[in-house]
Amino acid sequence: MQWQFWIIQTLNSVAFGGLLFLLSSGFSLIFGLMRIPNLAHGAFFMLGAYFGYTLLRLNLHFWLAAIAGGLGVGLLGILMERFILRRLAGNEQGQVLVTLGVAFIIADICLLVWTGDPMPLAAPQALRPPLRVWGFAFPTYRLVVLAIALVAALALYLLMERTRLGAMIRAGVDDMEMARGVGIPVSRLFTTVFLLGATLAGIGGVLGGPILNAYPGLDNDMLPLALIVVILGGAGSLLGAFVGSFIVGFIYNFGIALVPDLAYFVLFLPMVLVLVFLPQGLFGRVQI
Amino acid sequence: MTLRAAVALAVCALALLVLPWIIGNEFYVNMATQVLIYALFALSINMMLGYGGMVSLGHAGYLGIAGYACILAVTAGYDHLTAAIFAVAVSTAAAAFFGLLSLRAPGLGFIMITLALGQIVWGIAYRANDLTGGDNGIRYPARPMPFGFDLRDAPSFYYFTLAVFVVALFCIWRFSRSPFGASLMGARDQPRRMRMLGYNVWLIQWLTFVMAGFWASIAGVLYVYYNLFLSPHAISLQQSAEILLMAILGGASTLTGPIVGAAIITLVKNVISTYVERWNTLLGLIFVVVIMFMPYGLVPGCAQLWRRLRIRGKTPKAASSPAAMRAHGASEDARDRAGDTRPEAGSLARDTASEPAP
């Protein structure tokens, strides 16, 4: 059934794009404000998935587990920002390398705690049966993930464009010195944005669990995708992260379905095109 | 070259030459070979990192491209020499292309792009089962026999690696002392001024990127000869990070730093992994500790400490003697070269970061 294949793959792509948005919106915000690519972001996502697995094993309700898992990762993000990155203020190169070191530590501790076997996360009971419309079966859970990602995108948009906090973040992204000069507490802003970014990655990890499973190496699978999203969409831009996520979601998913051997190679192509013709990315606010 | 430096060099050379006789045990000779191979990787990444201020996290990609190209060429029936030349050429060409892309973004975007490129190479190696054997990896049939020398046993392969390493070290030393190396350091510290002086900063950085890729490819071929096997695990992000850490730990922007760093990391890794499984945690911890507390690495750090001790050992008046002044000046110099981005240099870093793209 050819139609079914295309429809399902399309749906999988947008659902995966939604997950990528949860991952890369935080990455992009952190990059935009603090000017550092947080290389621990993939590890945050994986940790979220593992937290979700454990919380579900404790019979916590799925959505509660998603929120709790996300906040747990967010807390870790705050600790990392306050106790490590803060000490290297001004040394951006050092900050990036430290995030990589933290990523290795998180990944190895995950391996220690949750072993090397893939851990499946069960989707909520109510969402397991496929949704049937006009004879086509749709995986309900993926539709819900997509809906959540869209809601999150809207909420983030409102946060950034309509609230005082968002205005301060935008000011910091556009001109850090000036923002400091007019009395915006940039230091507190850093912590807030790091909390937000890490929490989003953690929630993304839990929600992605039923689709991807939690396994060692999930971090290194997701991190390059987030990087490519940000390179495509442009750093510091929410719209860029949104559009970039769905582009990468489509390309990666169809790449795996159609040319599994070259799934990564097809990702390479849009990245090259954007870098050559639009080095700031599609909607970039800051130079990466 | 001063007499003392010449003596030190002669002692090092002699030590490296007689090393297999002293340690005897094949296991340790092999470890010494590994150190040399990784030292070459670290030296090559240091051309970019130390002299050019470019942090690459995709360096294992060249190991992958050169390694797989070498294995595939030999499996296709070419002789070892042709295969090696082919592998290095392909991988250097890839470096030229990757350099074009990575240098589109100055500063931290460079890290992201090199990381993404390195991971794409890894992903292709992992997925392209027909070509690379996927997760299982592929074997290299046997070590070459250059001019009839048998390289199968550990000491003779050690000497083979040492010969390649010495040639590379000499070239990289020449590179760092050449006018080109000086212009590269200028492009790192004051890109605007260099541009005003008529230097093509982009071209200088790109050529360095390609040269670093070339030496990493050579190291990649050696790696395949040594292991006779290549799998995606060898070219993961972790490998790139280890190579980078070697250069930083030993002291980027010095010639000896990356070698010391490679020796320490390789030995620690080999020793630790026989006792505990948690090498990655340790790697991460070393990363964090080195960057937070030892940003200039061991070699400049120890050199500074040594100078300070010598100055303190003399009478207080000696601190103002010409020799002490020179020593102080040299340590300042080392700090500058270590790419200090602490507050006083912060404004400079921002200055370059906010520069519009070329």
Image: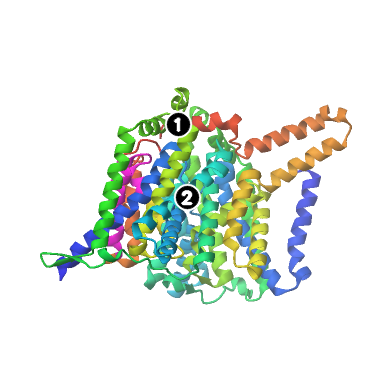
- How many numbered marks appear? 2
Amino acid type, mark 2: Leu
Q: Chain of mark 2?
A: A
Which of label 2 and label 1 is nearer to you? 2
Q: Chain of mark 1?
A: B
* Residue under the image location 39 percent in, 43 percent down: A28
Residue A130 in the image: above or below residue B46: below
Distance from disc 2 to disc 1, alpha carbons, whole Å, reads: 22 Å
Q: Quadrant of the N terminus of chain B?
A: top right
Q: Quadrant of the C terminus of chain B?
A: top left
Q: Which residue is mark 1?
A: B354
Left/right placement of residue B312 relative to residue A161 reads: right
For label 2, the crowd category at 10 Å Cα-Cα, with few meaning under 14, some 14 to 19 and many 20 or more, is many
View extreme (top): residue: A182
View extreme (left): residue: A134
Residue B344: horizontal and vertical position, in percent? 60, 29
Left/right placement of residue A164 relative to residue B276 reads: left
Residue A113 in the image: above or below residue B183: below
Q: Is residue B93 visible?
A: no
* Residue closer to the observer: A105 or A61: A61
Q: Which residue is mark 2?
A: A39
Residues rendered magenta in the picture = A227-256
* Residue under the image location 48 percent in, 54 percent down: B58
Does the magenta-highlighted stretch encompass residue A240? Answer: yes
Amino acid type, mark 1: Ser
Residue A241: horizontal and vertical position, in percent? 33, 45
